[in-house]
Image (cartoon, helix red, strand yellow):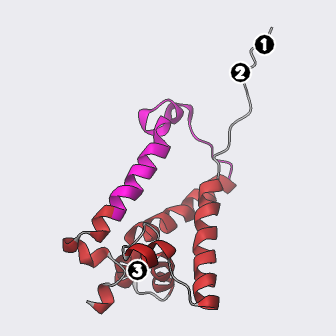
Amino acid sequence: MTSVLASTSPRRISIAPLVAWGTTLVAGALTNRLFGLSCPFHEVTGLDCPACGGTRAIASLLQGRFVAALHYNALALALGLLAVPYLLLWKMGWTVPAGWKESWLWQHRVALVVSGLLLWTVLRNLPGFTWFNTDWAHS
């Protein structure tokens, strides 16, 4: 009798978070270009959300303005730069090693990402951290 839990097929890493992030950036860029709308969170609170400035950061990077990209949204830039090798490895058939799946970091990855986004949101909105908010060019 074989166990239902045993599987010989490798599990692929889900690219759903990357697709969602990319779709959000594209939708934000199109919404802003077509309708002149900005981030609803920023409009209501006056604060930068974790993604605020992400589209401008990627656009600045594509124009070769790396420092400006860091100013607009360092987190979006870092995630964007990490996405490229991740997608290449995934396309080449890379899967998460079994040892990683058993690690504390892997098991708590969602909580860590949410905590990181909350920390980034708080830090970039503190008065002393104006270098990382989207209004840096206007200060």
The location of residue 85, given as percent across then percent down, is 55, 61
In this rendering, the answer to whether 129 lies above or below 9 is below
The amino acid on which the numbered mark 3 sits, given as a three-letter code, is Ala
The amino acid on which the numbered mark 2 sits, given as a three-letter code, is Ala
Name the residue located 63 percent from the left edge and 83 percent from the top edge: 30
Magenta span contains residue 119: yes
Residue labelled with disc 2: 6
Mark 2 residue element: loop
In this rendering, the answer to whether 76 lies above or below 114 is below
Residue labelled with disc 1: 2
The location of residue 72, given as percent across then percent down, is 39, 79
Q: Residue furthest front?
A: 44
**First in sequence: mark 3 vs mark 2:** 2
Residue labelled with disc 3: 69
Name the residue located 56 percent from the left edge and 37 percent from the top edge: 97
The location of residue 16, given as percent across then percent down, is 65, 55
Q: Looking at this view, is 32 or 11 the one in front?
A: 32
Q: Which mark is residue 91?
A: none
All told, the count of numbered labels is 3
Mark 3 residue element: helix
The amino acid on which the numbered mark 1 sits, given as a three-letter code, is Thr
User: Which image quadrant is residue 139 in?
Assistant: bottom left
User: Which image quadrant is residue 29 in?
Assistant: bottom right
The location of residue 26, given as percent across then percent down, is 62, 76
Q: What whole-number distance in Å separates the C-alpha atoms at marks 3 and 2?
A: 46 Å
Magenta-colored span: 92-121
Q: What whole-number distance in Å separates the C-alpha atoms at marks 2 and 1?
A: 8 Å
Q: Looking at this view, is 100 or 114 the one in front?
A: 114
Label 1 neighbour load within 10 Å: few <14, some 14-19, many 20+:
few
**First in sequence: mark 3 vs mark 1:** 1
